[in-house]
Amino acid sequence: MTTRAKEFRGIHLLYWLSGLFAVMLAVNAVFLFWALRSFPGEQVKNSYVLGLDYNSEVARRRQQEALGWTAEVGLSDEADSRLIVRILGPDQAPLTGLAVLASTHVAGEASATSIELSEGAPGEYAARIEAPGGARVETQVTARRRSEETAVFKADKTLVMP
């Protein structure tokens, strides 16, 4: 008694290729879903216009470097999760009397939150921030002299909530 092997025909090839592409499309759909869920899109409004106006950003950074200011951005060790920003002048002395704002963006959320920081100790500005424990928070700090309208100092920092 001889057993005869089934023939591999064109329809079988069609089934294999269709299955392969179906699996590939399903995996791509899952990756696309998670990519869009974890990064909602632009981080900066009008990024195209900002790209065209890049030379003014370079000039702003040169002006900031000429000031010689430095900033330390971090979180307090306390349970209330306070954002603390220390701004120092070129002589490493604390800079007081500034208007300091922070924009925080929690990873996975669509919008950013603006917070006005208040000065506690000389040169130390703080505010409470809301974010779940372990969350990654992109923070952009801007400072200006109270007598001026435009920010003269910007600093970026990525923080991980305790």
Image (cartoon, rainbow, N blue to C red):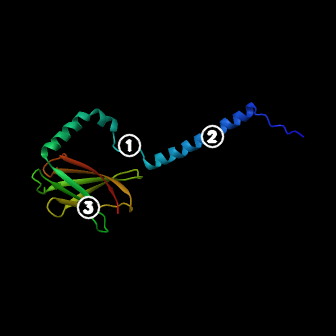
The three-letter amino acid code for the residue at tag 2 is: Ala
CA neighbours of label 2 inside 10 A, class few (<14), some (14 to 19), many (20+):
few
* Residue 50 location (% of width, % of height): 29, 37
Tell me the residue at 63%/39% (across/down).
20
Does residue 14 sit above or below 139 in this rendering? above
Task: Say whether residue 20 is left or right of residue 88.
Answer: right
How far apart in space, not on screen, are marks 2 and 1 (Cα)? 31 Å
Does residue 115 lie above or below 33 as drawn? below
Of marks 3 and 1, which one's residue comes earlier in the chain?
Answer: 1
Q: Residues within 10 Å of mark 1 (few under 14, many from 20)?
A: few
Question: Where the N terminus falls, by quadrant?
Answer: top right
Instruction: Please state the horizontal and vertical placement of residue 116, each as a whole percent of the image.
Output: 24, 57
- Name the disc covering residue 42, or none: 1
Distance from Cα at disc 3 to Cα at disc 1:
26 Å
Q: Label 1 amino acid?
A: Glu
In terms of image quadrants, where is residue 120? Answer: bottom left
**Residue lying farthest right?**
1
> Identity of the amino acid at label 3?
Ala
Residue 145 at what x, y percent from top left? 14, 51
Q: Quadrant of the C terminus?
A: bottom left
**Apparent side of residue 104 relative to residue 121 in the rendered image (left or right):** right
Q: Identify residue for label 3.
A: 127
Q: Is residue 44 above or below residue 114?
A: above
Location of mark 2 (residue): 22
Query: In the picture shown, does residue 117 fall above or below 16?
Result: below
Residue pictured at 11% horizontal, 56% vertical: 93
Instruction: From the image, state whether disc 3 or disc 2 is nearer to you.
Output: 2
